[in-house]
Image (tube, rainbow, N blue to C red):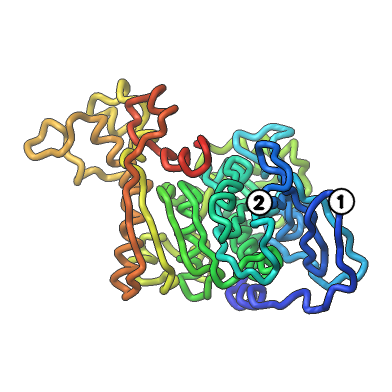
Amino acid sequence: MWSPSLLVFSGTLVIGTHAAVTNLTSPLGPVVDLGYTAYVGNSTSPTGQPNSTVTFFGGVRYAQPPLGDLRFRAPKDLDETYDPNRTVIDARSWGPICVQQPAKEGLGVEDCLSLNIWKPTSAKADAKLPVIFYIHGGGFYAGSSPDFPMHDWVAQDQNIVAVSLNYRLNLFGFLDGAAVRANGTPNAGLLDQRAALFWIKRHISAFGGNPNEVTISGESAGGASVLLQATAWGGKVPVPFKRAIAQSIGLFSLPLDHELEGIFGNVTNAAGCPTSGTEAMACLRAAPLSQLIKSINSVRNNYLAPTIDGPDGFLPDLPSRLISQGKFRRGIDLIGGHTTNDGRNFAGNPKNVNTDADVRAAVTNRYRHVLYPPPNVSGSPFVDNYDRAWTIMQDIIMGCMDQHWVNATFKAGHKNAYSYRFNVPNPVDFAANPWRGVGHTSDVYYMFNGAT
């Protein structure tokens, strides 16, 4: 398990102090030299315009491949020792995405820990431009950075550097249980994000970025990741970013310990491995991806997600409790919010929610709804039971957490904390499903040219 002291050291380590012996170039495009390696980028725009104002670098590694014995462990730093014989790596295309859920062969790989970087083509290494770091959503079980291209962000404002990442998902990023804690690392996907931020701290200046002016942002599971990076280790560890934008924080109920063991049992049984002990982890690490695809698909979506991993872990308690107790990193400039009807996507079609029993089925019996009276009760704010169901879902999953965090930040004395509500529907989704209103990811449609 990563300890706070190791993380601080990793974040402040200075790499590449040797002067470059040669000025590395490539006929393929602009080159950024990091001392231990170098990358050639792509200055052709997505529409095919050559020599554009933005240069893209894809598939830039920020950690060692999490393969073999590194499977189910915290990310391990690259060897960034100065290499006088370094060569230029082709980074003109996206790197491979991580394994998805539902899983199938050919859809994602384990060796996926890479960044994508967009810089103004004219920006020099000493430009010190602010950096925006985007974390994709997808419930912690799916999603990838190519779904959210940031070329236009830099093209429209030549005064920023944009970065996105791939991080381990589902089984590979969020397997937990007693065996994992004894011989592995829970919340590896969140640690991937932190490792990427430390890589940015060390190297983004070579791309024209300012490592001291980093804003992290994300939507849904990406928004939850933003929150969890701020509450990591109960706020005791300095963070490698200055500002945060959390959109539609998507965090379902975290599993209890006995539920974790049940999930671990499903995973090991599907893989044909022992269900406990060091033998279980050894077997899971030795299993081919084709075998673990069965394990991934044996678990329900959202069940392989962030977990409370103990008092010294990345997530020592419920995020809501950490915020209430002031155990989050102070001094972060913050914007947090959600769309008007974020919860409707999760409550399902209104045709299926008419009775009190339907509401319970939509929300599940785990959530108390004392504050959500039936629509036929005097004083109820709800028009019908569907209105009641989607409101509960929105409050549980998204609506409360952003306001909770913003209020706590403001009360802690940091005034650069703002909340918002996005009230413009995704026109494509609204035309097909008008009942969703300004549904989940409506804001993403406008941020990424039609992405959802």
Q: Residue furthest right?
A: 85
Q: Is residue 395 left or right of residue 157?
A: left
The percent position of residue 178, horizontal first and vertical second, equals: 59, 58
Tell me the crowding category of disc 1: few under 14, some 14 to 19, or many 20 or more residues within 10 angstroms, Cα based: few
Q: In terms of secondary structure, where does tag 2 sit? A: strand
- Residue 320, numbered label: none
Task: Give how far apart the Cα atoms at labels 2 and 1 are.
Answer: 17 Å
Q: Residue furthest left?
A: 378
Give the tally of numbered discs.
2
Tell me the crowding category of disc 2: few under 14, some 14 to 19, or many 20 or more residues within 10 angstroms, Cα based: many
Identify residue for label 2. Answer: 54
Sequence-earlier tag: 2 or 1: 1
Q: Identity of the amino acid at label 1?
A: Pro
The percent position of residue 214, horizontal first and vertical second, equals: 54, 66
Residue at horizontal 73 percent and vertical 33 percent from the top: 105
Identify residue for label 1. Answer: 27
Q: Identity of the amino acid at label 2?
A: Val
In this orientation, which residue lies closer to the viewer: 422 or 373? 422
Q: Quadrant of the N terminus?
A: bottom right
Residue 74 in view in this figure: yes
Residue at horizontal 39 percent and vertical 66 percent from the top: 322
Q: Is residue 358 left or right of residue 129?
A: left
Q: Is residue 102 above or below residue 62?
A: above
Residue at horizontal 31 percent and vertical 46 percent from the top: 395
The percent position of residue 425, horizontal first and vertical second, equals: 37, 35
In this orientation, which residue lies closer to the viewer: 53 or 430? 53
> Is mark 2 in CB contact (under 8 Å) with mark 1?
no
Residue 258 in view in this figure: no
In this orientation, which residue lies closer to the viewer: 360 or 5? 5
Residue at horizontal 61 percent and vertical 52 percent from the top: 164
Q: Is residue 305 above or below residue 345?
A: below
